[in-house]
């Protein structure tokens, strides 16, 4: 009896070990992005022509034409920040050169913007403080169940005719809803943005955006940014770092080329070069 | 552009800089400049920094008798990328150029400003930092 029990126990132990080993050797299979086919590449040619470089209109026009409806307690804070700006002490919408994030990526960007179509995704590039990028998945996936929060959030899109419809969630709550370079309010979380991006005239593209930010807005914010296409080579996107202007080019103690810090006001205006010995 | 600084002094500065935390300023609003004040500073370009996010002109201002009196920093309100689209290059200004710069000064009276217009006094050429490609608007 004991011998039979011991044999059964040993057999069970052996089975468990095999199953356990097999389990350890077969982790959850990663989801793969399938290699695009020739048909996938061909399909891109049927999309509207968004090639070239797109220059945004002045953000002052954008936000003045489409002011958000803040909750009353938030509107008071906005007024305070406007007063600070008018007094020359702007609140830092640009914080330590962190990414501006969405919706600033569209509403506040200052330089050239480019749209890249590849199978399963649209990529938006711009010059905003470090050549930020957005990735919009158009391969039919959903948002992740438990996404990591990021400055630009997680974006999925689909085409309705010639309009790219984009749905964005998972934006960091610290990311600003901006109405000025010095006036913005953190979205405080649960922000949802729907964009309809389309061409409305010759070389004229619009991003019609609806921003839901339930913690700070009293109603969805409908805002449109206009872009004009240029094919001038001088408008090609160039490198755009955010902090290079904190330094001037000089030499380190070993004689190598080096960036040397310059003095600024608290608000960021350059005040003084390093003592170069060249000052007349 | 004045690129190379005296090595020993620069080295000392680098060591000094490493001993305290520098505020990260870089891209910033221009609210510290007073848009209601327009002032012209005449002098000689010491340095033209073709940097992101804002290019900067450093000039040594001269008094009525032509003597150097103080140094000014003058920020251009945008980046080399956008300035290129406006017709500027990194060679638009160079050390030694005599200039008259119309600017909005810092509100606190220190010698900094936001560029409105620069005139090269030896050629009469005028440069501004505005006038990108016309941009469409739906008026929506």
Image: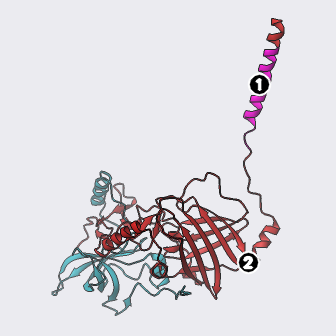
Judged left or right of residue B3, residue A125 is: right
| Span shown in magenta | A8-28
Tell me what residue is drawn at x 35 percent, y 70 percent.
Answer: A81
Q: Residue furthest bottom?
A: B124
Residue A16, label in figure: 1
> Mark 2 — on which chain does it sit?
A
Observer-nearest residue: A131 or B72?
Answer: A131
* Image coords of residue A157 (percent x, y): 67, 67
Judged left or right of residue B104, residue A69 is: right
Q: Which chain is cyan?
A: B
As drawn, A6 above or below A64: above
- Neighbourhood count class around disc 2 (C-alpha, 10 Å): few under 14, some 14–19, many 20 upward: few
> Mark 1 — on which chain does it sit?
A
Q: Tell me, what hue is chain A? A: red
Tell me what residue is drawn at x 54 percent, y 58 percent.
Answer: A150
Observer-nearest residue: B46 or A234?
Answer: A234
Tell me what residue is drawn at x 54 percent, y 86 percent.
Answer: B137
Callout 2: SS:
loop
Alpha carbon separation for disc pair 2 and 1:
56 Å
């Amino acid at each position: 009896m004991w011998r039979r029990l011991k044999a059964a126990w040993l057999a069970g132990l052996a089975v468990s070990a095999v199953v356990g080993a097999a389990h350890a050797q077969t982790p959850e299979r990663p989801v793969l992005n399938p290699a695009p086919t020739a048909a996938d590449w061909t399909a891109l040619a049927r999309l509207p022509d968004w090639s070239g470089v797109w220059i945004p209109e002045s953000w002052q026009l954008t936000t003045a034409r489409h002011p958000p409806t803040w909750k009353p307690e938030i509107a008071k804070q906005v007024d305070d920040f406007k007063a600070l700006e008018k007094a020359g002490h702007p609140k830092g919408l640009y914080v330590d050169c962190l990414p501006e994030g969405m919706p600033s990526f569209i509403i506040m960007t200052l330089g050239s913007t480019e749209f890249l179509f590849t199978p399963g995704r649209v990529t938006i590039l711009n010059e905003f403080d470090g050549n930020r990028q957005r990735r919009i998945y158009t391969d039919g996936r959903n948002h992740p169940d438990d996404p990591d929060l990021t400055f630009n959030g997680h974006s999925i899109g689909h085409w309705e005719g010639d309009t790219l419809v984009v749905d964005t969630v998972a934006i960091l709550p610290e990311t600003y809803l901006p109405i000025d370079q010095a006036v913005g309010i953190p979205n405080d979380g649960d922000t949802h943005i729907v964009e309809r991006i389309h061409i409305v005239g010759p070389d004229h593209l619009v991003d019609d955006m609806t921003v839901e930010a339930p913690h700070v807005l009293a109603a969805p914010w409908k805002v449109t940014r206009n872009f004009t296409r240029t094919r001038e080579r001088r408008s090609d996107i160039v490198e755009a770092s955010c902090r290079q202007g904190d330094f001037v080019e000089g030499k380190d103690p070993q004689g190598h080329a080096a960036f040397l810090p310059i003095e600024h006001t608290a608000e960021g205006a350059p005040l003084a070069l390093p003592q170069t010995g060249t000052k007349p | 552009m004045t690129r190379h600084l005296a090595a020993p002094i620069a080295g000392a500065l680098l060591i000094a800089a490493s001993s305290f935390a520098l505020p990260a300023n870089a891209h910033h609003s221009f609210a510290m400049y007073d848009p209601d004040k327009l002032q012209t500073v005449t002098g000689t370009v010491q340095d033209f920094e073709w940097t992101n996010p804002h290019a900067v002109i450093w000039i040594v201002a001269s008094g009525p008798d032509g003597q150097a009196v103080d140094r000014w920093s003058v920020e251009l309100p945008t980046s080399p990328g956008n300035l290129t689209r406006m017709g500027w290059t990194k060679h638009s200004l160079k050390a030694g150029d005599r200039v008259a710069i119309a600017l909005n000064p810092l509100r606190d009276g220190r010698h900094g400003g936001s560029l409105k217009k620069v005139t090269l006094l030896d050629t009469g050429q005028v440069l501004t930092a505005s006038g990108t490609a016309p941009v469409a608007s739906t008026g929506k």
